[in-house]
């Protein structure tokens, strides 16, 4: 396991053939379920703040246009001598204040959008961690050990747990056979050469394969060539 949790169910037992990425067991991690819901709620809240800030932009833009229109109108009146300069200056400052408020609202939108990204990253992290609640087979093979039962609490490796795998899966296709070829015959070994094997305990059945690789040097003590054969 990559995370700690309770075994909700197991889907494979000793002797079962499994495929790559097949789910062998499912863990129940209640605190991670709650955390994911909290992260998703945070994303929704941040998205709502973006919409709210965007709506505020429209109001600020309208206020800026109104202040600008008022300032330009009073400025023309002031130039004609029909309005004192103090009122014109007050209108100009109101227009500047409206412009500053509009920039602030735009900055609020940028900050809210950044908050959405932060909340989204937190949600994605929680989702990724929760995916580890599905213990999967790393390759195609046969289950040779099952060390879990329903309801059992498991810990990831290196955290002081039982220190044993939940399942053991053996890959039997291909099987890699190691042969120490006597030095007198080592000269004839080439990668890719066809091989016929009779294995002890296999009832005399003949297996065929190919040389995958060899050490290209003799063991200095045994005077044999380490050879790997895929069957």
Image (cartoon, rainbow, N blue to C red):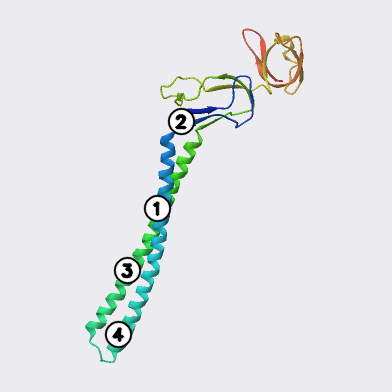
* Residue at image point 31% right, 75% down: 95
* Residue at image point 52% right, 23% down: 166
Locate residue 126 relative to residue 205 in the image: left or right.
left
Q: CA distance from mark 3 to mark 2?
A: 50 Å
The residue at which mark 3 appears reads as 100
- Label 4 environment density (alpha carbons within 10 Å; few <14, some 14–19, many ≥20): many
The residue at which mark 4 appears reads as 74
| Residue 198, position as x, y percentages in the image | 74, 11
Q: CA distance from mark 4 to mark 3?
A: 20 Å
Q: CA distance from mark 2 to mark 1?
A: 28 Å
Mark 4 or mark 3: name the one nearer the start of the chain.
4
* Residue at image point 29% right, 89% down: 77
- Label 1 environment density (alpha carbons within 10 Å; few <14, some 14–19, many ≥20): some
| Total numbered badges shown on the rendered structure | 4
Locate residue 216 relative to residue 64 in the image: left or right.
right
The quarter of the image holding the C terminus is top right
| Residue 156, position as x, y percentages in the image | 46, 26
Callouts 1 and 4 close, C-beta under 8 Å? no
Mark 2 or mark 4: name the one nearer the start of the chain.
2
* Residue at image point 44% right, 38% down: 33
Numbered circle sitting on residue 45: 1
Q: CA distance from mark 1 to mark 4?
A: 43 Å
Q: Between tags 1 and 3, which lies in front? A: 1
Numbered circle sitting on residue 3: 2
Q: Between tags 3 and 2, which lies in front? A: 2
Residue 131, compared with residue 168, is above or below; it is below
Mark 3 or mark 2: name the one nearer the start of the chain.
2
Residue 93, compared with residue 116, is above or below; it is below
């Amino acid at each position: 396991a990559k995370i700690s949790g309770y075994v909700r169910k197991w889907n494979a037992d000793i002797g079962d053939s499994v495929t790559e990425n097949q789910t062998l067991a499912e863990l129940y991690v209640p605190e991670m379920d709650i955390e994911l819901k909290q992260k998703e709620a945070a994303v929704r809240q941040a998205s709502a703040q973006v919409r709210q800030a965007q709506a505020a932009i429209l109001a600020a833009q309208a206020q800026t246009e109104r202040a600008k229109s008022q300032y330009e109108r009073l400025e023309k009146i002031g130039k004609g001598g029909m309005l004192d300069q103090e009122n014109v200056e007050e209108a100009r400052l109101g227009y500047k204040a409206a412009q500053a408020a509009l920039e602030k609202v735009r900055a609020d939108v940028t900050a809210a959008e950044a908050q959405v990204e932060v909340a989204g990253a937190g949600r994605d992290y929680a989702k990724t961690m929760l995916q580890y609640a599905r213990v999967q087979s790393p390759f195609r093979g046969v289950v040779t050990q099952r060390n879990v039962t329903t309801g059992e609490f498991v810990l990831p490796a290196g955290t002081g747990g039982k220190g044993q795998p939940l399942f053991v899966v053996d890959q039997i296709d291909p099987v890699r056979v190691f042969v120490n070829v006597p030095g007198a015959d080592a000269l004839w070994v080439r990668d890719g050469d066809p091989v016929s094997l009779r294995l002890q305990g296999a009832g005399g059945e003949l297996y065929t394969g190919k040389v995958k690789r060899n050490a290209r040097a003799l063991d200095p003590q045994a005077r044999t060539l380490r050879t790997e054969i895929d069957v």
